[in-house]
Amino acid sequence: MMRTEAILPVREQVPGERFNVGDRIKVVELRVDRGPRGPQILVSRSHPDLIRLLFEQEVPEISDHTIEIVNIAREPGVRSKVAVKSTNPRVDPVGTCVGFKGSRIRPIIDELRAERIDLVPYNDDFIKYISSALTPAKVLGVNIISAGEVKQTEVTVADDQLALAIGK
């Protein structure tokens, strides 16, 4: 049996996570370099692809491409927002990813040590998509500003909803 060590730099760790020797953790491989004593593997627990890989492991519909992960926004250790869409109109992408009584999402949350995960249904209508992505904040208005190739969006929320909408 060949053993290999991986390097998990502080910048790739989730703030507040502590590990002990012998702990089993899931990571995403970022890079493999040739070192003087064999390969050096750089891994991460804060990269958004970790969320994608955990969902692929737990939700078979993602592996067989019935459900697609369109985008992931992550604030490691705090909250992740995952936009999902279904290629089959009879399959609810959010419900499928959550599973019966949270049976599919619970192992992912446990692995991420209680990081909140918001599943957002992807919508081709940009305004509806932005509004659902900013939940639980109540969006009052969305204005799309186009200047050539550059597109910006101005979103209006109530003052007491600002922290919910933008996070930290």
Image (spheres, rainbow, N blue to C red):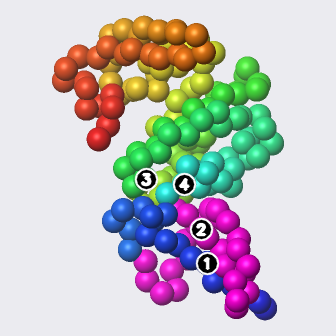
Does 88 appear in magenta? no
According to the picture, the residue beneath numbered tag 1 turns out to be 6
Residue 94, image x and y in percent? 58, 32
The reply, left or right, for residue 54 in relation to residue 90 is: left
How many residues crowd mark 4 within 10 Å: few (<14), some (14–19), many (20+)? many
The image quarter containing residue 165 is: top left
Question: Which numbered circle lies on residue 47?
Answer: 4
148 vs 163: above or below: above
- Residue positioned most to the left: 160
164 in relation to 25, above or below: above
Question: How many numbered dots are placed on residues in this image?
Answer: 4
Question: Disc 1 vs disc 2: Cβ atoms closer than 8 Å?
Answer: yes
- Quadrant in which the N terminus is drawn: bottom right
Residue highlighted by disc 3: 76
Pointer 3 or 4: first along the chain: 4
Q: Whole-percent x and y of residue 143? A: 42, 8
Looking at the rendered structure, the kind of residue marked 4 is: His
Q: Which amino acid lies under the numbered mark 1 shown in the image of this protein? A: Ala
Q: CA distance from mark 1 to mark 2?
A: 7 Å
Q: Secondary structure at mark 3?
A: loop
Q: Residues within 10 Å of mark 3 (few under 14, many from 20)?
A: some
Query: In the displayed structure, does residue 31 sit left or right of residue 65?
Result: left
How far apart marks 4 and 2 lie (CA) works out to 9 Å
State which region is magenta: 19-45
Query: Are the residues tagged 3 and 4 within 8 Å (C-beta)?
Result: no
Q: Earlier in the sequence, mark 1 or mark 2?
A: 1
The residue carrying mark 2 is 43
